Image (tube, rainbow, N blue to C red):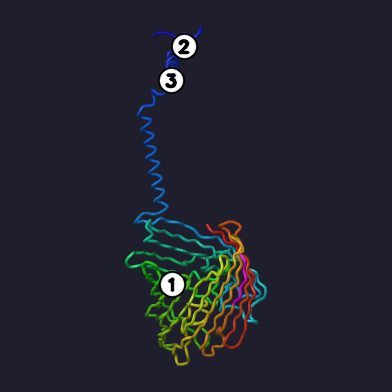
Amino acid sequence: MGKIFIGKILLPPPVRCYLVFLMLLILVPPVAFAGDRPQSEILVLKERLSQLEQNQGKLNTGSRDKPSVQVGGYAKLDVVYSSASAGASSIADEFIVNALIPSDNDGESDQLKMTARESRLWVKGATADNTSKFYIEGDFFGDKPSSSETLNNNADFRLRQAYGEIETNEYGRFLLGQAWSTFQNLSAFPHATTLGTLPGQVFTRVSMIRWTSPANHSLQIALENPESNLKDLNNASVRPDDDRIPDIVIRYNLQSVSVASLIRQLRCDMPGTCEDSQSAWAVSVTGRLNPTTRDQLRFQIHLGDGIGRYVSGAVFPGGTINANGDIETVEVQALMLSYQHQWNRRWASAVIFNTASADNLNAIGGASEEVTTFHVNSTWRPTKPLRLGFEFIRAERETVAGTDGDLNRLIFSSKYHF
């Protein structure tokens, strides 16, 4: 074999091969290697990138039959200072419960409570054409151990809503599952900073079958889970669980106002306690108005005979049981007004007034006869997902026997959406 000398250095054969290959790389024009193979690889990469983009689009929008899935919720802290406590471990110290507003001679005074139980998680999905969707939501207002605050503030996760919805152009929209009652207008919720079953407000979630008319979705008809909530002459709650007919709700939605009606049956078949059934009804007018671009008025007006659990956080029973074991329906009138002013895009303030009263409680001395709350609050959004709020609440309750109760409450809340 031949040998290659560089100066006086003799190069072995392996090194000579590397030198020859290096000279070819330097001397042969780069265009000689720009053949079909690199071009084909570029085309393959472009095709793969296009497929990835298409798959990403399917993930975000969902396919025709399989919905895309999104997860969200918020983390919330409430710092609640109350002039009177509703009792040890009472949920009424965390948000307003009308029936548990302490009377003047009940409970301890001046109490501080800090809680994150309103924090919420939801999962939802929809197909690309939006004709099929689902929603599941829960929070942490379930049961908690009696020693929870002593140890680690445990609280059970509870179901709030879980439903599926299908929409057709010809037959309208169908919802099946647990959701806010059809008798309730979500767009007329008060501008409050925390949860609470306010006196003038419809506030209930139920299992249902709901139909919504096609096109403008103005008419809604629902069959909702029945529940007869009654009270005996000792002011004890009686829930017979003897219902046979679903509650029927019919609601008509205009642009800014909704009108709803409720028809239900109260039934009890408990020998020795009550054996009777009574028809009940209610009507509701709710909505929101915008006097200016920065001001909004939300209102709710409810009137019913046996409306029961649908309004005022079930502070009033649907009916009472008299000495003969018969059911007598309870008449209820309720009003809510909420006015908010938007100072700028981050800061808003609101004033809220609620009142509700009941008749025909058969002289059940401890039963609530009238409940009123007054709220002033201000909210600030330092960033889009974060809302900070301050609220003052004055709540008053009067019983059939004439016992009065009142509550002053200051609340600071932080709410971070994700």
Judged from this view, the residue extending furthest toward the right is: 110
* Mark before the other along the chain sequence, 2 or 1: 2
Camera-side mark, 3 or 2: 3
Read off the residue under disc 2.
11
Task: Find residue 76 and name its label.
Answer: none
What type is the residue that disc 3 sits on? Leu
Q: Position of residue 217 (x, y in %)?
A: 40, 68
- Range shown magenta: 373-380
What whole-number distance in Å separates the C-alpha atoms at marks 2 and 1?
A: 94 Å
For the residues bearing labels 2 and 1, Cβ distance under 8 angstroms:
no
Read off the residue under disc 1.
253
SS assignment at label 2: strand
Camera-side mark, 2 or 1: 1
Camera-side mark, 3 or 1: 1
SS assignment at label 3: helix
What type is the residue that disc 1 sits on? Asn
Read off the residue under disc 3.
25
* Mark before the other along the chain sequence, 3 or 1: 3
